[in-house]
Image: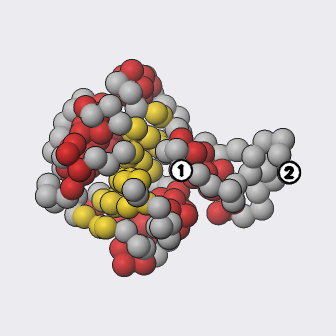
Amino acid sequence: MKKKIVVAIGGSSGSIYAKLLLDKLSTREDLIIGVVMTDNAKINWEIEIGPWNPSDYEVNYYENNDYYAPFASGSAQYECMIVCPCSMGLLSRINHGISNDLITRATDVILKERRKLIVVPREAPYNLIHLRNMTSLTEAGAIICPATPSFYSNPNTLDEIALTVVDRVIDLAGINQSDTYRWSES
């Protein structure tokens, strides 16, 4: 049985996190991956990385207005959803249950089904509204994993820095990986 994962790409800066996440997950035989992204995410992807082409990845791609996507319903049994990167506007809509597109509908489904929602906010600094929204989402069962890289692996490239966040997200999703830095392990 393949594990079903939704990757939602929000419109904040930080497309590198989503790209590296898709690079690592899309070639795995043990996963079914649904991908959806906001219009602003497509714009930022193009600015930060280059043209977005869903056929570059072995995923099922859905437009953000496609309510027929399987993960728009709990009966499809997607086990985990990762919102990476997540703007504060998207985080607020998720927190307040505003299901006005596929991403916010799918996050609502994941939360109501008591499945794993991992939100990767990419913003700094946080204001009180951001913090309260993150607190409320955590209380609702989501995991907030800010796009805050670590440096004890001595990363040398931008990709290696971003991978410190992506690898943490993959671990949180419960997906086994062997090609990542582990503290105090050789």
> Horizontal and vertical percent for residue 113?
27, 34
117 vs 61, left or right, is: right
In the drawing, what numbered circle is on residue 161?
Answer: none
Residue 89 in which image quadrant:
top left
Question: In this view, which residue lies farthest toward the front?
Answer: 1
Three-letter residue code for mark 1 = Ile
In the drawing, what numbered circle is on residue 175?
Answer: 1
Q: Which residue is mark 2?
A: 186
Kindly tell me whether residue 14 is visible in this rendering.
Answer: yes
Mark 2 secondary-structure assignment: loop
Q: Earlier in the sequence, mark 1 or mark 2?
A: 1
> Horizontal and vertical percent for residue 59?
37, 68
Mark 1 secondary-structure assignment: loop
Viewport quadrant of the N terminus: bottom left
Three-letter residue code for mark 2 = Ser
151 vs 41, left or right, is: right
